[in-house]
């Protein structure tokens, strides 16, 4: 496959020419007017010396206010996890789109197909990017199918200007979705090129460095809890007032050291503990389990013996064989206990029960972890409690206990010490739990155990695959397919969705899949890699 960067001079596809011919010729240089900054979707965004801060939002997959309207779509749609999103502007003039912030995949793309998203009303409540209205868009005549842990999308690559926080990134490569399945929002990926054999292209982080916006490919991510609006991503910076204790430096594993050989934000988990509501602490012996950090996933997935140890240790938990979750009483979420994860020699991240528990229905709560035998992952149920600096240039992650005591952002420079080794959070470490308690009984996380209590009746209506896009899996590249028909201009709200009136999303999903397969069969399809 040709590297995408060499395609930037490719001729526009006939479809795009048709579209672009109706528009005035784009100016050679687009002046960055101060007004475009003011119109930034991120009103709280700040730009300092070489860093860009942008707020992120926690969105319930199917917000409560939408649920009533979704009754006719069946129970399945109710049980969607929390998604962390970011608003960015694309094109000239800029159009605001809301994207899932995903550290588990590298690509940036917009315009999911709502009819086959499994969450049609929710998906349609967000504006789509109408590329026919952008004066700066260019078709790269290259298409891809991106597959995620859940769902997939066929995209056409284009370049266009992107405003994130208050920074304008020029000519960023991004995908315009054609057909997609089971993904309700576009995705802003922030991982390295996942497969070493894939030809990488300049991702958003690369462009920010190339264009002098930040000094090195590093960002910090502070998800905060579901009801807290102050989560943020800082490209090229660290907010010392958003964590307590020292930032622990942990090397990103080489792909060859990981279960799948994929290059993600993998680190080693070296211990697990439980701090019970009465202050008692149990801790495992030292372990060495590779896990990666995936902000695009709602839950965490850990080896089954760890899953069992955590689930069974929750006060009053019941294993539900039907859904595969440990169910707990929702009142546990407000108890003072925590699930504790240890990294490196002695860095403990305490995840309060309230952040680790997932409220599936108004009166049903489950422990936010599932078992996996292949790629252990920490999703949002862990990340809410951690402040994480992702340093791609030096291949290190830096972790600390998340907290909130104001704002004091320092820039991440460049070089091996870009993230200082002695950075300590300005927030006070919370008393209790972490600093002692002398765990009497150990926590056995290496032996299979039977659940102490098993749920008998109908458990929660969830299956294991209903949340998050999950990490990127496969990527299939083809020649350009031409730009898709825009699905309606940015108004949001129900509007006509491309004339597809089919109420049965399953059936229409099938049709779409077949159409794509046929369309691709006619092209010289190149399978780049499969997991
Ligand atoms: C995308 O997902 C749909 C629904 O799961 C599936 O039917 C289809 O085969 C997938 N397409 C590709 C190219 O993987």
Image (cartoon, rainbow, N blue to C red):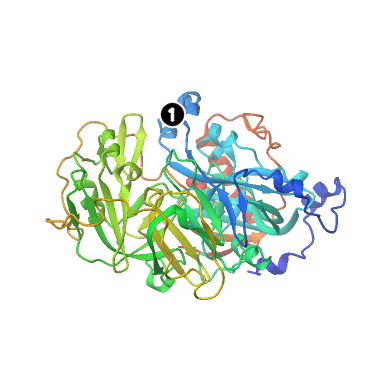
Which secondary structure, mark 1?
A: loop
Q: Quadrant of residue 138?
A: bottom right
Q: Is residue 127 above or below residue 419?
A: above
Point out the image quarter for the C terminus. Answer: bottom left
> Can you give x and y, in whole percent of width and height, for residue 311 in the image?
24, 47
Q: Nearer the viewer, residue 398 or 108?
A: 398
Q: Residue furthest bottom?
A: 416
The residue that disc 1 covers is 74
Assess disc 1: are there few (<14), some (14-19) or many (≥20) residues with their C-alpha within 10 Å of its C-alpha.
few
Residue 486 image position (x, y, % from top left): 70, 41
- Indicate whether 521 appears above or below 361: below
In the image, 344: left or right of 232?
left
Q: Does any atom of ligand 1 lie closer than 8 Å to the CB of label 1?
A: no
Q: Residue at x 59, y 59 (%)?
A: 51
Q: Nearer the viewer, residue 434 or 72?
A: 434
* Residue lying at 40% horizontally and 50% vertically, measured from the top left: 403
Closer to the camera in the image, 14 or 295: 295
Q: How many marks?
A: 1
Residue reaching furthest left?
A: 440
Q: Residue at x 51, y 68 (%)?
A: 392
Q: Relative to residue 257, is residue 101 drawn left or right?
A: right
In the figure, is residue 1 to the left or right of 466?
A: right
Q: 224 above or below 471? A: above
Relative to the observer, which residue lies in front, 448 or 503? 448
Left or right: 505 as drawn, with respect to 17: left
- x, y percent for residue 144: 61, 57
What residue is drawn where x is 71% and y is 69%? 6
Q: Give x and y (percent) for residue 1.
A: 63, 69
């Amino acid at each position: 496959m040709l590297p995408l960067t060499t395609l930037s001079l490719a001729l526009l596809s006939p479809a795009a020419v048709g579209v672009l011919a109706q528009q005035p010729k784009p100016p050679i240089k687009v002046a960055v007017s101060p007004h475009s900054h003011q119109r930034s979707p991120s009103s709280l965004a700040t730009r300092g010396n070489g860093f860009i801060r942008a707020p992120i939002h926690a969105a319930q997959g199917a917000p409560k206010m939408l649920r009533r309207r979704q009754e006719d779509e069946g129970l399945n749609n109710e049980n969607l996890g929390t998604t962390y999103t970011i608003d960015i502007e694309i094109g000239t003039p800029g159009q605001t789109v809301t994207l899932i912030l995903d550290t588990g995949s590298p690509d940036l793309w917009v315009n999911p197909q709502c009819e086959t998203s499994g969450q049609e009303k929710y998906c349609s409540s967000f504006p789509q990017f109408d590329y026919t209205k952008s004066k700066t868009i260019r078709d790269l005549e290259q298409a891809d199918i991106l597959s995620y842990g859940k769902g997939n999308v066929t995209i056409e690559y284009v370049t266009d200007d992107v405003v994130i926080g208050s920074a304008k990134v020029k000519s960023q490569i991004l995908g315009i979705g054609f057909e997609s399945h089971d993904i309700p929002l576009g995705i802003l990926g922030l991982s390295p090129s996942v497969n070493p054999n894939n030809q990488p292209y300049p991702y958003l982080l690369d462009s920010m460095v190339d264009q002098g916006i930040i000094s090195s490919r590093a960002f910090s991510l502070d998800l905060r809890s579901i009801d807290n609006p102050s989560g943020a991503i800082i490209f090229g910076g660290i907010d010392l007032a958003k964590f307590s204790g020292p930032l622990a430096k942990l090397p990103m594993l080489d792909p060859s050291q990981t279960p799948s050989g994929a290059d993600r934000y993998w680190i080693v988990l070296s211990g697990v503990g439980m701090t019970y509501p009465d202050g008692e602490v149990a801790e495992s012996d030292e372990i060495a389990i590779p896990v990666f950090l995936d902000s695009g996933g709602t839950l965490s997935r850990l080896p089954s013996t760890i899953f069992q140890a955590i689930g069974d240790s929750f006060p009053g938990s019941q294993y539900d064989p039907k859904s595969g979750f440990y169910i707990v009483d929702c009142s546990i979420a407000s108890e003072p206990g925590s699930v504790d994860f240890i990294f490196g020699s002695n860095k403990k991240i305490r995840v309060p029960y309230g952040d680790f528990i997932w409220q599936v229905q108004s009166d049903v709560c489950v422990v936010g972890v599932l078992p996996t035998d292949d790629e252990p992952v920490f999703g949002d149920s862990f990340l809410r409690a951690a402040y994480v600096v992702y340093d791609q240039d030096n291949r290190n992650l830096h972790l600390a206990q998340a907290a909130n005591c104001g704002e004091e952002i320092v820039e991440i420079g460049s070089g091996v010490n870009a993230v200082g080794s002695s950075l300590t959070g300005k927030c006070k470490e919370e008393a209790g739990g972490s600093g002692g308690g002398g765990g009497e009984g150990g926590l056995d996380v290496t032996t299979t155990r039977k659940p102490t209590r098993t749920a008998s009746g109908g458990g929660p209506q969830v299956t294991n695959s209903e949340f998050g896009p999950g990490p990127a899996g496969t990527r299939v590249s083809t020649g350009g397919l031409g730009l898709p028909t825009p699905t309606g201009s940015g108004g949001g709200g129900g509007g006509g969705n491309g004339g597809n009136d089919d109420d049965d999303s399953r059936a229409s999903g099938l049709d779409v899949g077949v159409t794509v397969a046929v369309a691709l069969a006619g092209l010289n399809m190149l399978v780049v890699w499969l997991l």
